[in-house]
Amino acid sequence: MPQTIIRLTVSDVRFPTSLEQHGSDAMHTDPDYSVAYVVIETDQGMQGYGLTFTVGRGTEIVVCAVEALSALVVGKSLEEIVSDFRGFYRLLTSDGQMRWIGPEKGVIQLATAAVLNAVWDLWARSEGKPLWKLLVDMDPRKLISCIDFRYITDALTEQEALDILVKAQTGKEQRVDQMLKEGYPAYTTSCAWLGYSDQLLKQLCTDALNDGWTKFKVKVGADLEDDIRRCSLIRQMIGPHNTLMIDANQRWDVGEAITWVTRLAEYKPLWIEEPTSPDDILGHAAISKALAPLGIGVATGEQCHNRVMFKQFLQASALQFVQIDSCRLGSVNENLAVLLMAHKFKVPVCPHAGGVGLCELVQHLILFDYISVSASLDNRMCEFVDHLHEHFRSPVVIQNAHYMPPKDPGYSCEMLEESVQTHQYPQGQVWKKLQGQ
């Protein structure tokens, strides 16, 4: 029977991670990992769950934006939405008045992602499949119909995208079996947040090595001499053959980035992540060109607004690693466009994750990328951060530093009700206690 969405609710849920410096980097020194958490309900009693990740203050603004979009969702049937998902995506992103506060970027796009993540979760649940399997099993033409190709046909046409998906049908079942058995390779960012002491850093590195981790990312950018010391320490801890990445979180000007990373080149980082403004495509291109002789790539994308910016990054050879985010872009629909463009341009995708729920969500996208798009694991890995997974009904499963494919139906977005209630801001028990109430 058709299912009509009769209600959409959104909550401001925050975790006081700043107290222990979890998530701290050169630009975000005191993040409180948070989500705008969406629940949609149907007249048939089903629910879909979605979220957008934030870092504390400002979450209430995303909540307001979700509420503004809710009128475009409530009253629609799930069947109506998925039969023309491209049209529904445009309904949310191209509203004649609300698009002015975008378009397709910033708060309104974060809100769009939260809403659409809930719709995709509902669709996958209605089919009884985890989202990655819903995507993998979908007919290529049906999947293409979920993507808005407006503004990107000079880089990727619908026919080219369809050809990519059809070609990847060969060997698909073997790749599904491989992922179910081995999982998708991951790297860890949990060991070297900028605010961590050397003692904690050493302990976390030792524990990670013992658990089988071989790929490590270090936050840099606040102080060059401190970065040299910390990168030297990490390289000594992990040895010469394991992989090291560095992440400046947009801290530098272009020239400064080139000079700074050149000083860190002796520690053999695979990439420098977000070296400058996330909007500076030509700046990233200049950095990429300057660092190429050192064997250091540029990675970016976690704050890349939309598919159009990714198109230009790819066209300008401004990045060597594409970092999609499950909430920054317009949900699954827009991420599909970026995955397909990245494949055409032969640039590996290494998603951004961590935060609250980002690991849970993006694992579905990268599994789909390997199984149905790229068919390659060369220079590919998905970020993992070991925080706050206990608040989810279907938390990620990591085995031998690999993401194991989720088996529960949906997009792995559903949070435990107790966690939502106790961490709601500002009335939840956790926040009342911190505020001395």
Image (cartoon, helix red, strand yellow):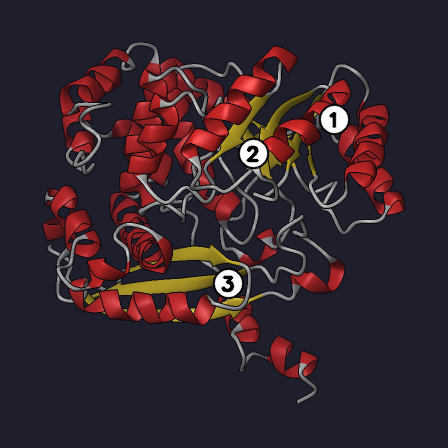
Q: Are marks 3 and 2 in contact (CB under 8 Å)?
A: no
- Please report whichever mark, 1 or 3, sits nearer to the chain's N-terminal start: 1
- Give the residue pinned by disc 3: 416
> What residue is drawn where x is 16% and y is 49%?
90
Q: Are marks 1 and 3 in contact (CB under 8 Å)?
A: no
Q: Are marks 1 and 2 in contact (CB under 8 Å)?
A: no
Q: Amino acid at mark 3?
A: Leu
**Mark 3 or 2, closer to the camera:** 2
Q: Amino acid at mark 2?
A: Val
| Mark sitting on residue 322 | none
Which percent across, then down, holds residue 427? Answer: 53, 82
- Give the residue pinned by disc 1: 264
- Please report whichever mark, 3 or 2, sits nearer to the chain's N-terminal start: 2
Question: Is 276 on the left-hand or right-hand side of 233?
Answer: left
Which percent across, then down, holds residue 8? Answer: 28, 68
> What residue is drawn where x is 60% and y is 38%?
384
- Please report whichever mark, 1 or 2, sits nearer to the chain's N-terminal start: 2
> What residue is drawn where x is 70% and y is 23%?
262
Disc 1 element? helix
Question: Is 144 on the left-hand or right-hand side of 239?
Answer: left
- Give the residue pinned by disc 2: 254
Q: Quadrant of the C terminus?
A: bottom right
What's the distance in space between the residues labelled 3 and 2, CA to CA? Answer: 43 Å
